[in-house]
Amino acid sequence: MQPTTRHIVILGGGTAGTIMANRLARHYAGDIKSGEIDITVVDENDVHVYQPGLLFLPFGMYDADDIVKPRGKQLPSSAHYLQARIAQVDSAQSRVLLENGTALPYDVLIIATGTRTAPEETEGMTGPGWQEKVFDWYTLEGSRALAKALSTFEGGNLVISITDMPIKCPVAPLEFAFLADWYLQERGIRDKVTISYVTPLDAAFTKKAAAAALAHLLEEKGIQLVTEFATGSIDGAAGKLVSFDEREVPFDLLAVVPVHAGAEFLTKTPGLANAMGFVKTDPATLQSQHQPNIFALGDATDVPASKAGSVAHFEAEVLEQNVIRFLDGKPFTDTFDGHANCFIETGFHKALLIDFNYDTDPVSGHFPFSVGPLTLLKESRLNHLGKMAFKYVYWHALLPGYDLPGVPTHMSLSGKDL
Amino acid sequence: MFAGATVEVDSEGFLQDPAQWTKEIAEAIAAANGIPELTDRHWLVLHFMRDTFLTTGTAPTIRSLGKESGVEVKELYKLFPKGPAKLAAKICGIPKPHGCI
Ligand SMILES: Cc1cc2nc3c(=O)[nH]c(=O)nc-3n(C[C@H](O)[C@H](O)[C@H](O)COP(=O)(O)OP(=O)(O)OC[C@H]3O[C@@H](n4cnc5c(N)ncnc54)[C@H](O)[C@@H]3O)c2cc1C
C-alpha cells in the first residue's frame, strides 16, 4: 500500500530556503525515499546571487561571475524544484497558488521569500538620473551599473544613503562607505570627493557600542555622517536628496538603499503579513502568528533580528527541529535567540566583527570564545580574511546546511567584555 | 509628573504603562515636545498607533503609519516634526518603539 505523503513546501530558494531544504532533505532522507515526505521548493528564477558579494562588485573586487550560480544546483536532488512565480497562499485550504495555475497542497509551509527593494516607494528615485547617477546597489544590475559609474567618477559629492529601516545587512552601507574611501584613495582622487553617509537612524548604527565604534571610524576616514534623515524624495536632475522635514543633501553620485518590503503575494492573505509584507512571526519559535502549519525564516519575517544570511542560518537550525516536532505532533523545545554575527569590512584589508542577539548588544572581546582568533568590534586583518573566506563557506557549508564549527546557534557570552 | 498625574516614564520620557495614559497627559507631552495643540489629524494618528500597540504589542513604523493610519508620511512629518513614529508613540503613551536592526 502506498503511504500517505506529507508535503513540505518551501517558498523561496534563496539563502534561507536552500538551507532549510538541504537540512530537511537530510533529516527525512529515508521518508522521502519511501514516499512519506515530499519537499518542494518554489522560486521564480534560477539565479542564486551571493548577496554579500554585491558590496564588492562596485569596487571591482568581484565580478558578477564570481557571485552567481544556478539555484537548482544548490538544492537537494531529492526535493522538487519548481521555477515559478508564487501568486498567493490560500491558508484556509493549506495550499499555495502559483501564477502558472498550479496549486500546491502543504502540510507544512515554510516562507523564505526574503525582501525586495522598493525604489518606487520613494518619490523621484527611479526618475531622471536613475542608473546614471542614482544607483540601487542591492541588486545585481544596480551594483554592476554602479561599478561602471564609480570607475569613471571624476570627483564631487558621493552620497551613500539608507532610505528607511529595516534593510538587509544593516552594516553593508557602512562597509560601502569605508570601501569607497579606500577605492577613491587607490584611484588617487580621494581629495576631490566628499563622502557623506546619510541615515534615518540617530547614529551610525542601531546598536550603541557598535554605533560609537563605527562613528569613530567614519570620522577617521573623513566621511560625513548625516543622521535622522528620512528621505522623502530624490531629485536626480538637480542632484539632491530631500528629507520629509525638508533638509537637503546634494550629490553627484548616489549609492542608495531603497525601502525594503516583503514579497507582494504575502499581503494578499489577510493576517499573514504586516503592511510592508513581512510575515508576522513568533520571534522564538518562528511559527507564523496566522496559522500553526506555516513557518517563516530569513528576511521574510518581521522578527526583530537582523536581516542577514547568518541569521537565516541560525534560524534554520531551530526551525528544522520545530518543523520535525510539529509534524510529529510534539511541542517545540528549541527557540531562536535573535543571534546574528557579521563581519564589517573597513577597507585596507581590514574588518571588524560583531556578534549579538535579541538581548545582548554587540560588545568588544573575542570570537568564538575567550581567546578566539577573531576580535570583536576591533579592526583586524584576520577579520578581513574571514569575510573574504565567507564566499567559499557560503556555497560549500552554509547553503548545504551544515553546522559551522565554532559558530554556535545560540549566542555565547563567553569571551565577551560585558 | 504630567497634567497633575504621577506616571512612570523611562529616561527618554516614554510611558512605561500604557494604562496610565490620559488625554491630558497626551496634551502635556505634546506641549513639552513643541506641539502646542493636538488637532483631529494628530488624534487620528495617535489613536491608530495606540490601538495597534494594544492589539499587536508592537508600535507601527513610519511607513506603515503612512499606509494605514489615513495620514501620509509627508503630513506625519508636519504633524510630528523630526521623528513622527517616536514622537507619536511618546504622546500616545506607549513604550519607545524598538528601532529596527
Ligand atoms: C549588499 C548586501 C550585502 C550583504 N552582506 C551580508 C553579510 O556580509 N553577511 C550576512 O550574513 N548577510 C549579508 N547580506 C544579507 C543576506 O544576503 C540576506 O539576509 C539573505 O540572503 C536572506 O536570505 P533569504 O532566503 O531570507 O532571502 P533571499 O536569499 O533574498 O531569497 C528569497 C528568494 O525568494 C524568491 N522569491 C521572492 N518572491 C517570490 C515570488 N513571488 N515567487 C517566487 N519566488 C520568489 C526570490 O527569487 C529569492 O530567491 C547582504 C545582503 C546584501 C544585499
Image (spheres, coloured by chain):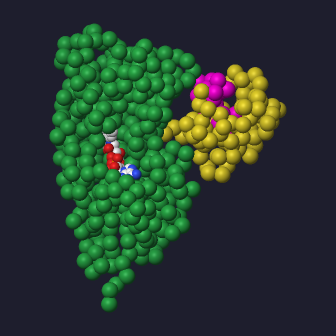
User: What colour do you see for chain A?
Assistant: green
According to the colouring, which chain is yellow? B
| Front residue of B61 and B32 | B61
Residue B72 image-quadrant placement: top right
Q: Is residue A134 above or below residue B26?
A: above
Picture coordinates of residue A145 (x, y %)? Answer: 27, 28
Picture coordinates of residue A237 (x, y %)? Answer: 41, 16
**Which residue is rendered at x = 75% and y = 22% of the image?**
B36
Name the quarter where the N terminus of chain A is drawn: bottom left
| Front residue of A277 and A96 | A96
Q: Is residue A75 above or below residue A189?
A: below
Side of B24 relative to A213 (left or right) = right
**Which residue is rendered at x = 48% and y = 30% of the image?**
A122
**Residue A114 visible here:** yes
- The residue sitting at the right extreme is B4
Residue A266 in magenta stretch: no
Picture coordinates of residue A96 (x, y %)? Answer: 44, 63
Q: Is residue A210 above or below residue A336?
A: above
Q: Is residue A148 above or below residue A55?
A: above
* Magenta-colored span: B75-94
Q: Main secondary structure of the magenta part?
A: helix
Name the quarter where the C terminus of chain A is drawn: top left
Residue B89 in magenta stretch: yes
**Which residue is rendered at x = 60% and y = 36% of the image?**
B66
| Front residue of A238 and A339 | A238
- The residue sitting at the front extreme is A101
Side of A56 relative to B16 (left or right) = left
